[in-house]
Image (cartoon, rainbow, N blue to C red):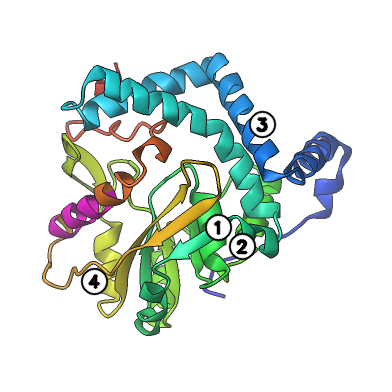
Amino acid sequence: MYENHLPKFQKAFLHPKHWGFWLGLGFYWLILCLPYPILVRIGKGLSWLFSQLKVGKRREQIARRNLLLAFPELSEQRREEILRANMQNVGMAIIETGMAWFWSDRRIKKWSKVEGLHHLKDNAEKGIVFVGVHFLTLELGARIVGLYHPGIGIYRPNDKPIMNWLQTWGRLRSNKDVVERKNLRAMLKALRQGETIWYAPDHDYGRKSAVFIPFFSVQDAATTTGSYYLIKGSPESKVVPFAPLRNADYSGYTVTISAPVDFSDLTEAKEIAMRMNKLVETEILKGVEQYMWLHRRFKTEENGDDGRKYR
């Protein structure tokens, strides 16, 4: 629809070498048919299993370091509480991704609600930069909102063709299209046509097209300048943030859509990135335990000594 080429199902995916994939996917789907309270128990079990694996222990170290860098003012006890809760959410993310891709619309609606939907409906005419951050619930949040206000997803293609097809199929369950994250031209075209694009500017995407500015307590966090190009390339579009969070009592999910944030007074890429980071911080603090702290958010250094903060 917007100059992107969506991955298609290929006959090659039926080759015997992929039978293990299909068997696993079928088992995954069967699990997702279970009642939600049972899925919660399975998710917690997966979290425990993840914590026992080598990769899990490494990711836990990264998350602990991120929390120290971002919140040095908190006590060690409080940071450990956040870390424990965060690691317990990892297994639920596996389940919730499946819910986003395979659950029916009826079942999604039963276990979710959206607050502030009018912020999308009232501002849709000129296009919306719909700012989400990498909560572990992000896939499910996109599916929930898409049921009421379909948009255009921004994604990084998976290196494996069969997984690339699957994730695209899943993300189109309740949205219009997906655009590869480097295709700025397609994003701007969608905005100018009054579409809503999903945009997550919170990760460290490397040195290229980045400025080094404060993010929480880290004063030199690599931050994408993509926000500048989207906002200035479509100046009439609105910037609307949202947070998809699992309810603390596991009664379902609440997606909170906030009022548009004004960037019209800013002209420089660095200024826009700084305001965007403040927006992102506000959203993360709504559910800090559910944020993806496992990512090396502060790995890129302005002086080239990448990874220094994690040694």
State yes or no: residue 272 in magenta.
yes
Q: Amino acid at mark 4?
A: Lys
Q: Is any atom of residue 228 visible in this view?
A: yes
Q: Is any atom of residue 307 visible in this view?
A: no
Q: Earlier in the sequence, mark 3 or mark 2?
A: 3
Q: Which residue is mark 3?
A: 42
Which residue is drawn at the image coordinates 43% and 21% (left, top)?
A: 60
Q: Quadrant of the C terminus?
A: top left
**Is 167 situated left or right of 69 in this image?**
right
Give how far apart the Cα atoms at labels 1 and 2 are. Answer: 5 Å
Q: Earlier in the sequence, mark 4 or mark 2?
A: 2
Give how far apart the Cα atoms at labels 1 and 3 are. Answer: 19 Å
Give how far apart the Cα atoms at labels 3 and 4 are. Answer: 45 Å
Q: Which residue is mark 2?
A: 109
* Viewer-nearest of discs 4 and 1: 1
**In the drawing, what numbered circle is on residue 112?**
1
Q: Amino acid at mark 2?
A: Lys
Q: Which residue is mark 4?
A: 232
Give how far apart the Cα atoms at labels 4 and 1 are. Answer: 34 Å
Q: Give the residues drawn in magenta, as a range.
A: 271-280
Q: Quadrant of the N terminus?
A: bottom right
User: Where residue 47 sits: x, y (%)?
Assistant: 56, 26
Marks 3/4 in contact by CB < 8 Å: the verdict is no
Which residue is drawn at the image coordinates 51% and 21% (left, top)?
A: 56
Q: Earlier in the sequence, mark 1 or mark 3?
A: 3
Q: Secondary structure at mark 2?
A: helix
**Is 45 situated left or right of 199 in this image?**
right
Nearer to us in this view, 191 or 8:
191
